[in-house]
Amino acid sequence: MQGWIYVPACKPNGIVQLIHGFGEHSRRYIHMISAFLDAGYIVAADDHVGHGKTAMVNNVWGDWGDKGCHTMMEDEHTLKKIVCEKYPNLPYFLFGHSMGSFITRDFIAKYGNELNGATICGTTGIFRGAKEVKEKLKEIIDAGHGGSDSGATGNGMAEKNLTLAIVLAAKRSFDKDSRFQVSYTRTSDTYPSLSQRANKNADMFLCVHINSASASAHGTETLWSKSRNSATQKKGLTSKTLATAMQSAAVAATGFTNRGLVDRPNLYVLKHTNMPACLIEYGFISNRKESARMKANTSAYGKALYKAVVNLMKKQGKY
């Protein structure tokens, strides 16, 4: 797939991704691209498989395989991930015309919670394969701290690096499971604000952290908000049920002392989320033995987090 990112001279207000129609190419929209640039928006656009520059490079014209729009939709999602890695924490919008509107609708059905908005232009009724798009469990996974905020430090380690490693390990498992639609507050060393982390819409919110106190402090604990347990209930799942499941899985993975659930109603990401939420403190970075074990086992912790969500959903009768 051949794609382009157009960047305005000024500080960008957001990002618009253009999705073109059948038998055309993205540069047909150069007048629209110019208008968005003048308005201060980054524009991302590609030529679909079988179209434009992509077809020229591959020497394959008009053939996008058996899955049609679904193939193109996943290509558009790949482009979005590339753009967001280069320009993180900006509002993101899609514009789809004609066949591009079908691709946009498919994108919204699977990855809608990653968008701030979408415009559908020149669309029609049901597109081929639409029934294949099923409701997925939507979840937010937050790797604590990041960027200039290192979080807790100790024994030559920084919390932000451990939390990111755990989340990326979980991501590798979730990426292979089509039942889940997961958004990550960060997948690199960046710092999303607390409001950017919490102000999202999904079915659950999982926050990954590492604890710190004295050198002798030890164990695994999970934070939740008792006062918001009823208000954040969603699809039969409560924060307490989620926290209990995550705590059990984290303790099994770390082998550390079970410190249980801790009620933290004033913690920002628990106070301001509108879904079942919990914050997992895997162990103490200030404890020499625990910090060494955490550093060596981030991959195992990520896999355990993924399995805990799967098992919880099975217990809830979702899968």
Image: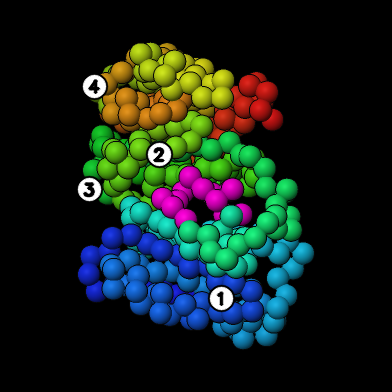
- Residue 115, how many percent across, how many down? 45, 51
- Identify the disc placed on residue 214: 4
> Is residue 316 or residue 216 the one in the foreground?
316
Q: Which quarter of the figure has residue 282?
A: top left
Give the residue displayed 38% in from the left and 47% down from the top. Answer: 186
Quarter occupied by the N terminus: bottom right
Furthest-right residue in view?
Answer: 66
Give the Cα distance between marks 2 and 4.
Answer: 34 Å
Q: Which residue is mark 2?
A: 200
- Identify the disc placed on residue 70: none
The amino acid on which the numbered mark 2 sits, given as a three-letter code, is Lys
> Is residue 175 or residue 297 the one in the foreground?
175
Q: Earlier in the sequence, mark 1 or mark 2?
A: 1
- Identify the disc placed on residue 148: 3
Q: Residues within 10 Å of mark 2 (few under 14, many from 20)?
A: some
The amino acid on which the numbered mark 3 sits, given as a three-letter code, is Ser
